[in-house]
Amino acid sequence: VQVMGTLSTTYGYYDEGESLLVSDPREVYIFHVLPDDTGYSAIWVAQRVPDGHIAAVMNSFTIRDVPLHDFPSFLYSANLPLVAESLGWDPKSGALIDF
């Protein structure tokens, strides 16, 4: 997940958005990626699927509320809070980011 995120922020993402399931033998993450507001990079978020649960991704974003201090359940690009703030999210409000 971190490698995919790093590649997308380094080289950009140039489609409308993508939603994927990413897994290894120990864990599964839902991964969403979008172009950032500059058009040259990307923003992304990943949510770990809890043990004993299942997830389905049907070409639609399913991650909505993103807590910024719930690692490793949520991973995200370093620029996510800045882009969210530029779109009206108030970091002092205590509200979660709606991806």
Image (cartoon, helix red, strand yellow):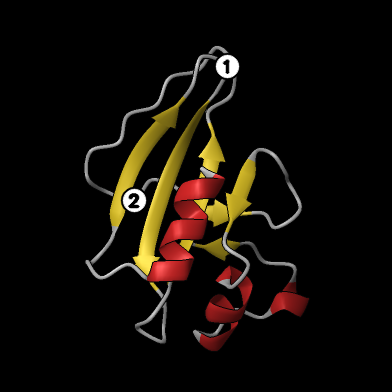
Q: In the image, 36: left or right of 52?
A: left
Residue 61: which disc?
2
Secondary structure type for disc 2? loop
- Across and down, in percent, residue 78 comes to 63, 67
Q: Residue at x 69, y 39 (%)?
A: 72
Is residue 64 among what the camera can see?
Answer: no
Q: Is residue 4 above or below residue 41?
A: above
Q: Residue at x 41, y 87 (%)?
A: 38
Foreground: 18 or 95?
Answer: 18
Q: Residue at x 52, y 58 (%)?
A: 6
Residue 26: which disc?
1
Q: Quadrant of residue 7?
A: bottom left
- Across and down, in percent, residue 24 comes to 49, 21
The amino acid at mark 2 is Phe
Q: Is residue 15 above or below residue 2?
A: below
- Across and down, in percent, residue 69 comes to 76, 53
How packed is label 1: few (under 14 Cα within 10 Å), some, or many (20 or more)?
A: few
Is residue 89 among what the camera can see?
Answer: yes
Q: Is residue 47 above or below residue 79?
A: above
Foreground: 13 or 56?
Answer: 13
The amino acid at mark 1 is Arg
Decide which of tag 2 and tag 1 comes sooner along the chain. Answer: 1
Q: In the image, 6: left or right of 95?
A: left
Q: Residue at x 58, y 73 (%)?
A: 79
